[in-house]
Image (cartoon, rainbow, N blue to C red):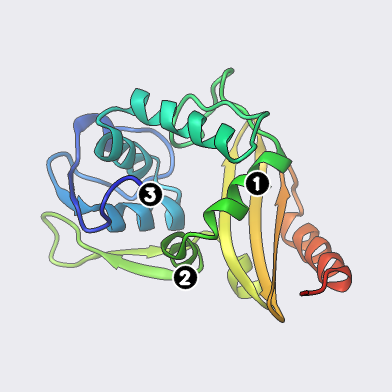
Amino acid sequence: ENKELDSLATISANASGVEGSSMYLIKGERLTLSDLLYGLMLVSGNDAATAVAEHVSGSVEKFVKLMNETALEIGAYNSHFTNPHGLSNAEHYTTALDLAKISAYAMKNPTFAKIVSTKSQSVPWKDHDYNRRLVNHNKFLSMYDGCIGIKTGFTKKSGRCLVSAARRDGVTLVAVTLNAPDDWNDHSKMLESGFSVVERH
């Protein structure tokens, strides 16, 4: 929403050194915002999240301010973000309902919808003779008929988290579970229940 997808981001030491899940960014390499978004959404790249934040807003702090402003604009009133990647912080929180609101809003963006439904993507890799191959962590894309996204998540404190979206007969539904060990089955049941009662008008 705030930067051209083909704009080039230069990876900082701050971004390349972020802990946790990674697309293995190298300090000084240059990638398009589009490439970083695939690294963010397919392999949960915390380094990509930081690089996106710095590229879009100039700093993580300014981007977090934008995140919180956008959340309020779309009615996610019980969320507060302190970072762009979701690593644990006492002041970083959300709810299943807010994640559903954010996801429904995001899925209206064709680029976002395309990225989160992509099962694998090739992205350039500095100092390598081959590209990065990013394989989507969201196995639900292949498990559930009509699944079109969205994102897995995990931290020790929050457990397994999943936001899914599925489309059938012109109806799109979003499901959210937090700290749910059996999330694949939970989402199958939730979506089946939803599709059994929701009709397109």
Check disc 3 and report the residue beneath it.
1
Left or right? Give the position of 180 relative to 10.
right
Left or right? Give the position of 193 relative to 143.
right
Furthest residue to the front?
A: 201
Which residue occupies 45% across, 29% down?
83
Q: Amino acid at mark 2?
A: Lys
| Mark before the other along the chain sequence, 2 or 1 | 1
Check disc 1 and report the residue beneath it.
101
Q: Nearer the viewer, residue 51 or 57?
A: 57
Q: What mark, if any, has residue 119 been given in the picture?
A: 2
Spatial CA distance of label 2 from label 3 is: 23 Å
Using the rendered view, name the quadrant where residue 59 is placed: top left
Q: Is residue 163 visible?
A: yes
Residue 147 point in image, percent of width and height:
63, 71
Q: Amino acid at mark 1?
A: Lys
| Mark before the other along the chain sequence, 1 or 3 | 3
Spatial CA distance of label 2 from label 1 is: 24 Å
Which residue occupies 80% across, 58% down?
186
